[in-house]
Image (cartoon, rainbow, N blue to C red):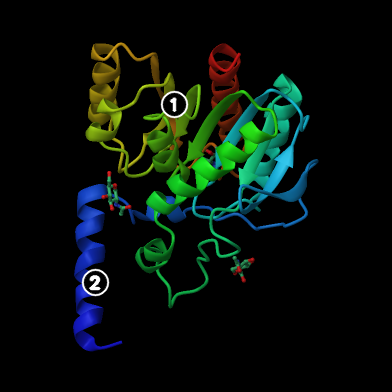
Amino acid sequence: MSMISIILLHLLCVSLCLQQGVSGHQCLENPPTLISTFGAGSVTEIGGLKAYVTGPSHSERALLLVSDIFGFEAPNLRKIADKVARAAGFHVVVPDFFCGDPYNPNNTKRPLEVWLQAHGTDKGFEDAKHVIAALRNKGASRIGAAGFCWGGKVVVELSKTDCIKAAVLLHPYNVTVDDIKEVKDPIAILSAEFDEALPPELLKQFEDILSTNHVSGYVKIFPGVSHGWTVRYQDDNVTAVKSANEAHQDMLDWFTRYVQ
Ligand SMILES: *[C@@H]1O[C@H](CO)[C@@H](O)[C@H](O)[C@H]1NC(C)=O
Ligand SMILES: *[C@@H]1O[C@H](CO)[C@@H](O)[C@H](O)[C@H]1NC(C)=O
Ligand SMILES: *[C@@H]1O[C@H](CO)[C@@H](O)[C@H](O)[C@H]1NC(C)=O
């Protein structure tokens, strides 16, 4: 790489950080140890992507879970999928949006900004639509979608369409006022007290826009936790687990209410 492109890349990173709080280190905190065989479900292929699937496969109600940058092999994410499937009988699908190439924090040659160039949320949105179409073909007539961090941006895009019945964003990344203005589906936004990219003032704006547009919206700020807390918590931290569980329950309640 030439010096010029290194400098340009650096400037791009800096400007992204400033604009979006995107490469904020908070997205990188507590990376999971990936386990490809983890969970009560199985890995199959759906809509052109590999996916972890769990819960009754012929249910008319399905949920799409869109991961953070660490991808679909994160044990806590699969635990959430199993939990939701068990509690409400949804067929839950967690696709591998990164085609075997999740963000690897150990690869210092490929910082987040560079990885994101190969794995933009725009592509994630296109892929998600294929997965939803495949779910419909299999008989799922009511579908909800939840997105964590990176996945939050994918799911806000889905919530502007007729593809899904309801959306849940958990500590979403790069979701803007303009995004929220276009949301059509009932949407819950679960956010941490400490999230550099999603301050309370911005959440208040989101709430006002949803209300003005008569979209069913629910915005909740979880006290004492940081960005990423719903999925990248430490298993042995009772407070963290409790708060994550509360968020999972809120997500489940939203889907039981709107994905009937
Ligand atoms: C990164 O390195 C740590 C420490 O060696 C290791 O535990 C972890 O599994 C590695 N993560 C990945 C994604 O390779
Ligand atoms: C953030 O989202 C906007 C569209 O809302 C997109 O143009 C931009 O590329 C995204 N930025 C990053 C860093 O993902
Ligand atoms: C446990 O989690 C809480 C909430 O995320 C955090 O404030 C606290 O520092 C954590 N405790 C330890 C010992 O890591």
How far apart are the alpha carbons under marks 2 and 1? 39 Å
> Foreground residue, 70 or 96?
96
Q: Label 1 crowding class (10 Å Cα cut-off): few <14, some 14-19, many 20+?
A: few
- Kindly tell me whether residue 116 is visible in this rendering: yes
Residue 47: horizontal and vertical position, in percent? 61, 47
**In the image, what residue occupies the spot 62% across and 51% down?**
72
Disc ID at residue 10:
2
Q: Residues within 10 Å of mark 2 (few under 14, many from 20)?
A: few
**Amino acid type of the residue that numbered disc 1 sits on in the rendered structure:** Asp
- Residue at 20% from the left image edge and 53% from the top image edge: 18
**Which residue sits at x=19%, y=84%?**
4
- In the rendered image, residue 82, in percent from the top left (x then y), is placed at 73, 34
Secondary structure beneath disc 2?
helix
Q: Residue at x 56, y 12 (%)?
A: 257
Q: Which residue is mark 1?
A: 162
The C terminus: image quadrant? top right
Amino acid type assigned to the residue bearing label 2 in the image: His
Q: Mark number for residue 94?
A: none
The residue lying toward the viewer, choosing from 57 and 104, is: 57
Which quadrant of the structure image shows residue 16?
Answer: bottom left
Instruction: Indicate which label's residue lies in the foreground, 2 or 1.
Output: 1
